[in-house]
Image (tube, rainbow, N blue to C red):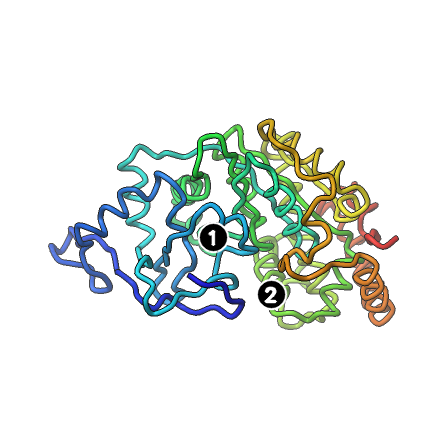
Amino acid sequence: MSRDGKGSKPGLIRIISLPNASQGEEQSIGIRASESDQKVLDSFFESPLLNVVGVDSKDGWWFLSRLNHEGYASAPFLDHRSFVFSEDEHAAFKAAPSLIRERYHAVGSPRRSFSTIFHVGHCGSTLLANLLGERSDTHVLREPPAFRWLANHQSEFERRGELGGWVDMVGGVVSRTFSPQHDPVVKASSWCHPLMEAVLELDGDNRCVFLYTGLREFLVRFLGKRRGDMEKSALKSFDTFSGELPLELREWERMEGWQRGTLAWLSKIWSCDRAKNTKDGDRVLPLSFGQLLKAPEQSLALVSSFLQLREADAPDEALASWATYAKDRQRGFSIEDEHQRLRNGEREHSQEIEQGLELSLSLIRKGLVSQDWTAHCDEASWD
């Protein structure tokens, strides 16, 4: 297996499926698992050795491939952004999620409690995951595709009354560890925040960190980068709570960029508020990016204590991840350079940012999210 930022689909895939019991024949899109493939599948929940590395967007298959403990520790993401598969790769499989779920129940639903880092996007979540990953007692999954797949299908599963069962199974997938002494920590993708309530409801020992920036900083990044990932996350976030908005703010295609960015930020805050208010609020820890930047050691200690991670060898005092770019350990990272770039972006988009702040404050006054967030709208980590 090789590392590559561009990614590609596995070159060699064994298709695993179950017979269609109702028609007495194989499913049209799969073949019956061979004996050797079945043995691989039987051991799926014994360890995370088979990583869900991607999802077929057309048919919904999960791509599985072997990944050892060192691979999990070094990969900034657990999908095509970090891994590609060569033609001679013999450890890649493709399996239907329904088959994984059947196996999950067949082996007694071996799910453990786990911790999750939810976030607004581009706010230090990968850095925090890397810092936690330096502990000897954690097994950190950075944006696992299975978790993202669950978020993408959440509304569909809710309509069919199946969400709880799928959350349970995916919880079993992401809580697999190589050792019982390892505590599983999931760093979710930025649009997975609607799952926060379901994750807390799944297990009374599950805990969530919610990492955020102030709206001002979020809009600087959103308007400055015009990145596809932030637009995609914004749209998914908007869909989550559009029914809570005034009618004039429900048509995404007619909105300007600053409106989209503002509503995306508010939707993530809204998910955090709902989780704190409808579930055990003490199991959600909001943490600002500014706090993480200003006091990394103290923030790491706070998060570790909150997540109730086992006693372990503490990371080196120098915090090895701190001086490197969060998504590429080979690149240096300068907080000063990053802040100067963001200040320049703030000046460039000052009018749009002011409009976004006004919109957010008006919606907060109407009760969309807690009044406590008013103080955080104008925050920026470079202040």
Q: Nearer the viewer, residue 158 or 233?
A: 233
Is residue 236 in view from this perspective? Answer: yes
The x, y position of residue 82, in whole percent, is: 51, 61
Figure quadrant of residue 122: bottom right
**Who's the residue at 80% across and 47% down the image?**
376
Q: Is residue 37 left or right of residue 177?
A: left
Q: Nearer the viewer, mark 1 or mark 2?
A: 2
Badge 2 element: helix
Amino acid type, residue under disc 2 in the picture: Asp
- Disc 1 to disc 2, C-alpha distance: 20 Å
Q: Quadrant of the N terminus?
A: bottom left
| Residue wearing tag 1 | 155
Residue 342 position by quadrant = bottom right
Describe residue 93's horizontal placement relative to residue 24 as left or right.
right
Label for residue 229? 2
Q: Is residue 59 above or below residue 191?
A: below
The amino acid pointed to by label 1 is Ser
Please state the horizontal and vertical placement of residue 126, each as a whole percent of the image: 63, 52
